[in-house]
Image: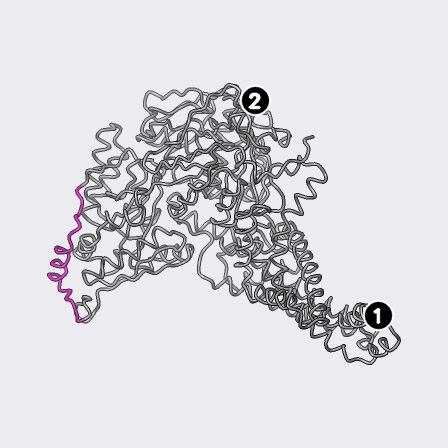
């Protein structure tokens, strides 16, 4: 039994190396690669203001839960560092150590690693994969992932170590869907629980996985702790323990970081970066986020059904200066409805320039004349609309103010309507808005545009704007079905040209994020699809460890 | 004592009605509030899945039916399940309530000690400049909102002069590995800042109340008699005046409870204290209606019971009330 410790709060400062890597221009500037020999041990505490709703993978919604589940559970295979999601190129083995395509490409046989075991010691078997598919697609489960599995027909188990996934059709992301949409679940734990009550079962709060970390404890509203699975078939991670310390809000999470109670906070607001830099025990890491923000028009409103109005608004907005004003170097102007991290993106799409003279001419020609107050009106109706924006997003609230200012210069009255997040969601779901500043986070798969801007996404996706263009839909479908990567990308490029010309929205910015990390932690490169993916490679040199790093694994027993 | 029973029985009945009304108002307000716990901007969650979520959470039925079900379950102690964590609300409250009670008990104790001392000192030496300063400071603290006070206390004592932890009930990682003394101190260390913050806002109120109560009894015959008998001034103040001036304070504690409960809502949130306040605050943000209603219900029950208890104590302490 270890004895009482000196005050922990002071320790990081006492031992931390004075390393502030304010790498605002170079991504991953502070990252160092790990050498595994003699580096095992240590605890990393992540401060997060995001509460955990469940630890049952099919029910996972929020990002903090995804971080934990990705480390506790395994997929059949992983997307590699190239982030390719077409075919199986670049994917790395995880629970499946190899896979074989059928000659007609309508099935993939995954061979499971025979060494893989659940954290309770039971071997992982093909029946677990079959059960997982069944649970994820069970309507009573209501999993958000089910729609991504719609083109999978079934899973069979020719033997205990082979799971064959059968598809209804051939398409480029077959492997991605089969291997990376489902975290494989233990049938021996979950199969006996009725699906209707599985969300509230003990297994949903005390998960048993096969990943390199295993679950220890979850104290609701306080913390979640996972520890290294030292006997894992893929080798033990270098760190002993990971703790998500749930703070009530952003500011409290930052205080925990400043006082040394936490080691990392994943998204520091740009306004707080100078304060982080003052702390010798902290360094910053800039990393890309696969997201884009836009001002979306509600095409059901007669005002925005008029293409000229949409064009005039785009012409009136100086996106470059707005992005610089709000994000400085932590963002770039978006070129279309995509994150440029997605391999199907195309940044060469022709853009509508910033040209207020052209905007004024266009509005005049459309009959919107300026009144005495400088604002435009037509037939007694003012050219005015509301800009809906969730109060939770500092960037977007500021962006709404800049849009208001810039549009006022051409005589358009845009009024920001800043509402609480769930009220904002209610309004956009009910199409009760004029315009909305949205921010879509991409999973970097080619399915993105299908889920967001196609006609089908109006009822089964995020197309709350009622944008509909059959040519765009056809180009996206062609891109998703073409098995030739070059031709597939060409279809997507064509689709982007169509939508950028149609202007259902003004594409505003793609952000970069800043994480603050304790200088004693040696991180691996942050991947755009998840900074936590390489956490098993993180380490803390023996000489830089604090009291909490020396706790060891005893608590997990 | 027998004379007290009907009086306490009437108060208990009133309390029951108050709790029922609070439950109904809480249910109604949450039902008509905008926002949907199943709404999301995750493209993977289709509208069909969102509709299924509403069915699973029992949000698809008519409001009156839902209200009837809520009352029937609540009467049996079943407050439903959290929309977010799927845990029974009663269990969540059972784990949060002791933390809030600890915090409030400490806050009440600290505010009583501080308020009594200050009130007595001010009544004995009304012109003392030190007393003026202390009382002035207490009044300033009294007039500040709790959440602001908590933020300032956090900033000063956890960040600027880092002598106390920033939040939580214990040091998460190492608490279990500390010595018995270390663990005990770890708990004290964590409760100090939130308890003192909560107490600081009540001290001035109690002090002013106590000072006035002391002034009220200052001219009483029994004090004059005691002085005439040669009892020391210290004994007169502490043994005679204070004991009699304490009676109104018992009632005042009953009135302090709602304010403290309300204050705990913000203080717990700022200090990451896993009590009822934080539970309620988080639930409001997450549109977790069963938890919000559960917390409102338990909070109002605690306040009502507190004032009932204060009433009973007053009746027991003051013989005039028994007749």
Q: Which residues are magenta?
A: A350-372
Instruction: Find residue A451 and report its image quarter.
Output: top left
- Which residue bears the numbered disc 1? B232
Q: Quadrant of the N terminus of chain B?
A: bottom right
Foreground residue among A396 and A444: A396
* Chain letter behind tag 2: A
- Which residue bears the numbered disc 2? A231
The image position of residue A534, as x and y in percent, is: 44, 29
Foreground residue among A213 and A193: A213
Instruction: Find residue B292 and report its image quarter.
Output: bottom right
Q: CA distance from mark 2 to mark 1?
A: 76 Å
Q: Element under label 2?
A: loop
Q: Is residue A441 within the magenta segment?
A: no
The image position of residue B253, as x and y in percent, is: 69, 66
Q: Residue at x 51, y 62 (%)?
A: B30
Q: Element under label 1?
A: loop
Q: Is residue A356 within the magenta segment?
A: yes
The image position of residue A467, as x and y in percent, is: 26, 51
Foreground residue among B138 and B132: B132
């Amino acid at each position: 039994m270890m004895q009482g410790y000196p005050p922990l709060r002071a320790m990081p400062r006492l031992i931390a190396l004075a390393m502030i890597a304010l790498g605002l221009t170079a991504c991953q500037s502070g990252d160092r690669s790990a050498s595994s020999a003699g580096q095992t041990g240590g605890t990393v505490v992540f401060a997060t203001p995001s509460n955990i709703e469940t630890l049952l993978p099919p029910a996972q919604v929020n990002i903090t839960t995804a971080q934990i589940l990705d480390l506790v559970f395994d997929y059949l295979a992983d997307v590699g560092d190239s982030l390719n999601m077409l075919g199986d190129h670049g994917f790395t083995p995880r629970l499946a150590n190899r896979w074989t395509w059928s000659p007609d490409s309508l099935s993939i046989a995954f061979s499971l690693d025979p060494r893989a075991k659940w954290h309770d010691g039971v071997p992982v078997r093909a029946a677990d994969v079959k059960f997982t598919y069944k649970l994820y697609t069970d309507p009573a489960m209501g999993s958000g992932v089910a729609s991504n599995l719609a083109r999978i027909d079934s899973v069979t188990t020719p033997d205990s170590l082979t799971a064959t996934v059968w598809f209804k059709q051939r398409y480029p992301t077959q492997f991605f869907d089969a291997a990376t949409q489902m975290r494989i679940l233990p049938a021996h734990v979950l199969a006996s629980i009725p699906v209707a009550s599985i969300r509230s079962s003990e297994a949903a709060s005390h998960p048993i996985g096969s990943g390199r970390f295993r679950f220890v404890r979850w104290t609701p509203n306080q913390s979640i702790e996972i520890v290294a699975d030292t006997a894992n078939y893929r080798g033990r991670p270098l760190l002993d323990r990971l703790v998500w310390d749930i703070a009530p809000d952003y500011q409290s999470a930052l205080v925990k970081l400043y006082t040394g109670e936490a080691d990392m906070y994943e998204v520091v607001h740009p306004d707080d970066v100078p304060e982080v830099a003052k702390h010798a025990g902290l360094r910053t890491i800039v990393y890309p986020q696969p997201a884009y923000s836009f001002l979306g028009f509600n095409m059901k409103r007669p005002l925005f059904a008029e293409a000229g109005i949409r064009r005039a608004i785009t012409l009136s907005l100086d996106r470059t200066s707005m992005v610089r004003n709000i994000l400085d170097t932590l963002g770039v102007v978006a070129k279309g409805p995509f994150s440029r991290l997605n391999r199907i993106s195309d940044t060469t799409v022709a853009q509508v320039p910033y040209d207020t003279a052209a905007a004024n001419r266009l509005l005049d020609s459309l009959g919107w004349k300026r009144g005495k107050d400088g604002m435009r009106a037509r037939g007694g109706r003012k050219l005015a609309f509301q800009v809906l924006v969730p109060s939770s997003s500092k960037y977007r609230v500021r962006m709404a103010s800049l849009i208001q200012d810039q549009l006022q210069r051409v005589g358009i009255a845009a009024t920001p309507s800043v509402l609480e997040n769930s009220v904002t969601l209610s309004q956009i779901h009910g199409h009760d808005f004029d315009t909305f500043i949205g921010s879509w986070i991409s999973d970097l798969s080619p399915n993105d545009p299908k889920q967001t801007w196609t006609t089908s996404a109006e009822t089964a996706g995020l197309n709350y704007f009622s944008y509909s263009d059959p040519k765009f839909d056809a180009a996206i479908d062609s891109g998703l079905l073409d098995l030739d990567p070059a031709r597939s990308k060409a279809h997507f490029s064509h689709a982007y040209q169509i939508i950028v010309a149609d202007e259902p929205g003004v594409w505003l910015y793609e952000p970069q994020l800043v994480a603050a990390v304790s200088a004693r932690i040696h991180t691996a490169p942050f991947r755009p699809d998840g900074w936590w993916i390489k956490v098993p490679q993180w380490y803390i040199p023996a000489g830089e460890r604090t009291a909490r790093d020396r706790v060891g694994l005893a608590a997990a027993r | 004592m027998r004379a007290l029973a009907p009086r306490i029985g009437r108060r208990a009945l009133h309390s029951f009605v108050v709790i029922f009304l609070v439950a109904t108002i809480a249910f109604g307000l949450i039902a008509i509030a905008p926002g949907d716990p199943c709404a999301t901007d995750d493209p993977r969650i289709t509208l069909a899945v969102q509709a299924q979520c509403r069915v699973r959470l029992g949000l698809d039925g008519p409001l009156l039916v839902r209200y009837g079900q809520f009352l029937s379950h609540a009467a049996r102690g079943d407050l439903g399940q959290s929309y977010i964590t799927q845990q029974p609300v009663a269990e969540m409250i059972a784990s949060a309530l002791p933390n809030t009670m600890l915090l409030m008990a400490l806050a009440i104790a600290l505010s009583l000690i501080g308020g009594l001392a200050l009130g007595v000192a001010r009544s004995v030496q009304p012109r003392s400049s030190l007393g003026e300063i202390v009382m002035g400071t207490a009044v300033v603290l009294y007039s500040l909102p709790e959440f602001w006070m908590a933020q300032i206390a956090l900033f000063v004592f956890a960040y600027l002069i880092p002598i106390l932890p920033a939040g939580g009930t214990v040091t998460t990682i190492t608490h279990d590995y500390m010595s018995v003394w270390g663990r005990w101190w770890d708990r004290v260390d964590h409760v100090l800042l939130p308890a003192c913050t909560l107490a600081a806002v009540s001290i001035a109120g109690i002090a002013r109340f106590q000072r006035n109560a002391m002034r009220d009894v200052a001219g009483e015959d029994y004090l004059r008699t005691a002085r005439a008998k040669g009892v020391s001034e210290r004994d007169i103040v502490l043994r005679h005046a204070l004991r009699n001036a304490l009676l109104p304070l018992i009632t005042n504690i009953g009135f302090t409870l709602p304010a403290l409960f309300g204050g705990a809502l913000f203080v717990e949130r700022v200090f990451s204290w896993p009590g009822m306040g934080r539970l309620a605050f988080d639930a409001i943000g997450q549109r977790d209606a069963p938890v919000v209603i559960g917390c409102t219900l338990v909070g109002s029950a605690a306040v009502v019971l507190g004032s009932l208890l204060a009433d009973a104590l007053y009746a027991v302490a003051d013989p005039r009330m028994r007749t």
